[in-house]
Image: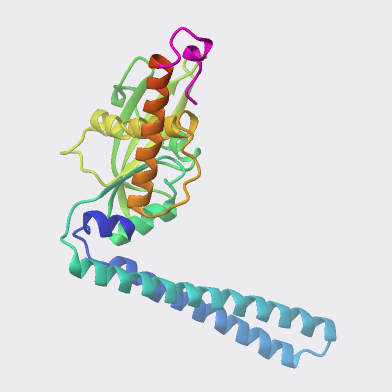
Amino acid sequence: MLIEKRVGSPPNSLVKYRTRTQLLSTQAKILEDRARRREEEASRARKHERRSILERRSKKLRTRAELLREQAVQVLKISQSFDILRQRNPRRGILIRGDAGFGTIENVMFLSELGYDFLFKGFSPHTAPVLAKEVLENQWIRFNPIISVAELGIIKLPGCPYLVRVILGRTKTAKPQVFQYFHLITTVPERLKDPIGLLKLYNARKIFEAFIKTGKNVLNLKYFRVRNFYGIQFTLVLGLLAHNFMNWARREIFAGTPLARIGTR
């Protein structure tokens, strides 16, 4: 939602996302029906122990049903908030890039339903080796001396109801003919980015990660006391000014002294 406030909304509707409400409500009703049957069985049970077991099961089922009902309400609230936002904002294309920590099936489903384009590294380390078994040697394309990639096309991943494009990658290890595998999940069509171009686009994230690490480790920009955009911007500017001032002071004021060689951290 914060992304859409700043750069606009994707062109797709929220119909897919709203179907979650109906799905969650249906699952909740199934659990409530099961809970009711357990309660009826408990009322007919002769043994106290059997009655207690059935009552506990019924309570657990109703608790799970309540959680699903709450999730359904939350999904409805979120979709309504997005509706209001998308009525005001011009529609634009948004591509979300993320590492394997974001490449879960749940996130892929969520972003597909909201209409975002994305490029993730797959979360599960077991998926890529399984997919690699179906790839012929002549399908691999050399990316660099260590990494090769292969186009798997538009497929369904285990547990995901939506079709996504998958690029498989393999990395050489110290042992001959032994590889480590990874996979990229995306909605970017092949006509826009071939497998090589897609991996380059994913790897471009490293520039931002290096900037963040430098900010934390060199400029000590770790614990911001503000959360809004302009407050963070102001904090970054102050940090950079302090860094530049220390470099200038080291060179101009402390020249010829041991302080001239001191680190700026």
Quadrant that contains the N terminus: bottom left
Helix, strand or loop for the magenta stretch, by majority? loop
199 left or right of 64?
Answer: left
Q: Residue at x 38, y 47 (%)?
A: 232
Q: Is residue 261 magenta?
A: yes
Residue 85 location (% of width, % of height): 25, 67
64 over 242 or under it: above or below: below
19 over 224 or under it: above or below: below
Q: Residue at x 41, y 73 (%)?
A: 23
Q: How is the image coloured?
A: rainbow
Q: List the single residue furthest toward the bottom.
A: 44
Could you tell me if residue 133 is visible in this image? no
Could you tell me if residue 248 is visible in this image? yes
Span colored in magenta: 253-265
Q: Nearer the viewer, residue 56 or 46?
A: 56
Q: Nearer the viewer, residue 16 or 220?
A: 220
Q: List the single residue furthest toward the right.
A: 48
Q: How many marks?
A: 0
Residue 226 location (% of width, % of height): 43, 52
Q: Is residue 257 magenta?
A: yes
202 over 51 or under it: above or below: above
Residue 51 location (% of width, % of height): 78, 85
Residue 252 location (% of width, % of height): 38, 15
65 over 17 or under it: above or below: below
Q: List the single residue furthest toward the front.
A: 253
Q: Nearer the viewer, residue 47 or 26?
A: 26
